[in-house]
Image (cartoon, rainbow, N blue to C red):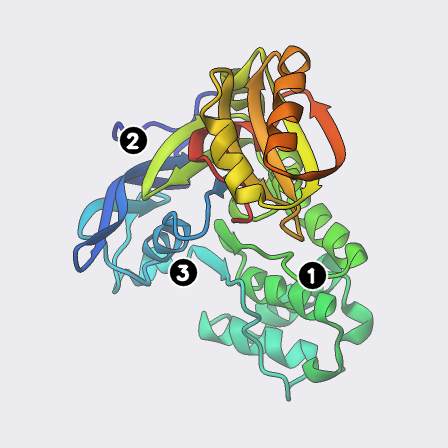
Amino acid sequence: MSDPVEPVPGAGGQAVLECAHLVRRFGERTAVDDVGLTIAPGETYGLLGPNGAGKTTTIRMVCGLLRPDAGTVRVAGRPMGTAAGRAKRLIGFVPQDVALYPDLTVRENLRFFGRLYRMGRRRLERRVDEVLELIDLAGRAGDRVDSLSGGMRRRLNIGAGLVHSPTLLVLDEPTVGVDPQSRHAILESVTRFGEEGMAVLYTTHYMEEAERLCDRVGIIDRGRLVAEGTPRELVALVAERDRVRLTAGGDLTGYAQACRRLARVEGAARGGDRGDVVELVVKDARSLLPELLDLAHEQGLDIRSVEIDEPDLEAVFLQLTGTALRE
């Protein structure tokens, strides 16, 4: 990737996050290989990739929790490192695992995290009240965390990352395991953050979240950033290609492998919450469908349904990585 030292066109001002040529190795394995990206003020950037692709390692380097073997990270022009206090104070990091004190109240947790940033008492109390409204927990401010639902804890987890008014908010799969109502509230909050000028780095295992929230998306696979652009730009990469979703019983892994050998199949992977789906990216699905069904019959599959969709971000991901996002 080229060194991304210029702000995103049209964003105005200096890029909030600038990563250039990041490399990180663990022994003989290269987890991140020459990754570069920028995030502008008010922009939400989605970082997507299969498990083990390098997302978490990249995030840890962005937040100064892990030193890169090569490359640089700058936050609002300040260099990042494991001891870069000025840069770290500009970041709000919301980890996937809830990091709160269960025996403290909602308000006490927010006060605690604000004091870590040496916020003055008056400013801190004012900001805690603002954050309680943002995460819709003002009515539960005096309740202990261990009395909250899972969705409320997730929202408070985000609040802990917001209390010091960061310039860059890093959200690592913030909606995993939450109920639909809380998930909707979280997504609405993230939309507001961007509208208010905050830069957001967002990772998720839900493609519809990336399509809804993200101004730009980067797809990382095997440690390298293999594509980057707006959702519309990325979808254009699979123009004139269709996505086929076949639900069936039987050896779907073997079927996906057999499908990849067909001339007009550009990607095939087993997926679905129960592992009962094969998702394919193909050229001219309707004319290819009889061949796909014949092959399924030869493989002894019990076909339950077949769907054909227009190209979307999931199709781009499948074509570029060869896997479904949740694999």
Whole-Å distance between the Cαs marked 1 and 2? Answer: 34 Å
Q: Residue 157, percent across and down?
A: 60, 67
Q: Report the mark closest to the observer, 1 or 2.
A: 2
Q: Secondary structure at mark 1?
A: helix
What SS does tag 2 mark?
loop
Residue for point 75% across, 77% down = 148
Residue at horizontal 58%, vertical 45%?
A: 251
**Three-letter amino acid code at disc 1?**
Glu
Helix, strand or loop at label 3? It is loop
Q: Which mark is residue 89?
A: 3
Q: Residue 296 at what x, y percent from top left?
A: 63, 31
Residue designated by label 2: 5
Nearer-the-camera pick, 218 or 43? 218
Can see residue 217?
no
- Residue 210 seen: yes
Q: For mark 1, what is the residue?
A: 130
Above or below 325: residue 28: below
Q: What is the number of the mark on residue 221? A: none
- Residue 71 vs 151, above or below: the answer is above
**What is the three-letter code of the residue carrying label 2?**
Val
Find out whether the residues at labels 1 and 2 contact each other: C-beta distance under 8 Å: no
Q: How far apart are the alpha carbons under marks 1 and 3?
A: 19 Å
Q: Residues within 10 Å of mark 1 (few under 14, many from 20)?
A: some
